[in-house]
Amino acid sequence: MESIVINNDEFFASVLECLKEGRDATIPVKGFSMLPLIRGEKDLAVLRSCSAPREKDIVLFRFNGRYVMHRIISIDGDAVEIMGDGVLENRENVHLEDICARVETILRGGKRRVNPYGRIPLMLFSLWYKMLPIRRYLLLCYRLLPWNFFWVRRQARAASLKG
């Protein structure tokens, strides 16, 4: 399968234009920051324009000149604290106007629709969030599972070649 490389700013400009027109946008997920619930290079995210984000929403937002997709941990007035499910410590602090879209659906493997706000996914997230002190070890075990090991190595190698 041949891939096309598009400049990030151009790509997200077209995504934001699509959202402004009231349409949903489907984008590929990159990286490990939302593991294990969302898998980079395997899953797709269906985005929708969002006027009133809530805690536990997965959102696309602008942070330090880049577009990032993580989960809202807390909202206090205009201040929003966001953290990736697969992140161990770092949290992003942004303003409401930095949030561009909300993830409506995850396409697992690019095909099977998963509602990230259903009862079971939110229960799993709550449990996962409480395990923050041991998340490092759980993610290591997840990455070493036979069906993930080579995928994770391939992603890490691709990331090291870019940077």
Image: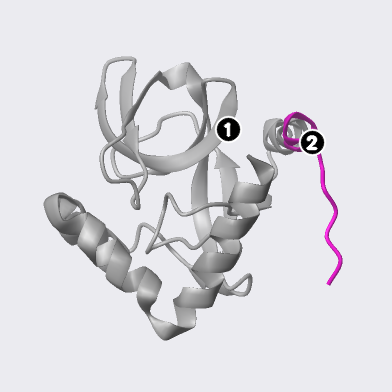
Classify 132 as above or below 122.
above
**Residue 23: image location, x then y, percent:** 70, 44
* Lower position in the chain sequence, tag 2 or tag 1: 2
Classify 92 as above or below 69.
above
Magenta stretch: helix, strand or loop mostly: loop
Q: Quadrant of residue 96 in the image?
A: top left
**Residue 145: image location, x then y, percent:** 38, 80
Classify 132 as above or below 148.
above
Q: Which mark is residue 7?
A: 2
Q: Residue at x 73, y 35 (%)?
A: 8
Does the magenta-highlighted stretch encompass residue 105? no
Q: Residue at x 41, y 53 (%)?
A: 34
**Residue 87: image location, x then y, percent:** 33, 46
The magenta-colored residue range is 1-11
Query: Hey, what amino acid is under mark 2?
Result: Asn
- In this rendering, does residue 123 appear at all? no
Q: Residues within 10 Å of mark 1 (few under 14, many from 20)?
A: some
Q: Residue at x 69, y 32 (%)?
A: 16
The quadrant in which the N terminus is found is bottom right
- In this rendering, does residue 150 appear at all? yes
In terms of depth relative to the viewer, which is nearer, 63 or 47?
63
Element type where label 1 sits in the image: strand
Element type where label 2 sits in the image: loop
Q: Quadrant of residue 72 in the image?
A: top left
The quadrant in which the C terminus is found is top right
Query: Hey, what amino acid is under mark 1?
Result: Tyr
**Residue 133: image location, x then y, percent:** 13, 50
Q: Quadrant of residue 141 in the image?
A: bottom left
Q: Which residue is mark 1?
A: 67
Q: Which mark is residue 31?
A: none
20 vs 115, left or right, is right
Q: Residue at x 67, y 44 (%)?
A: 162
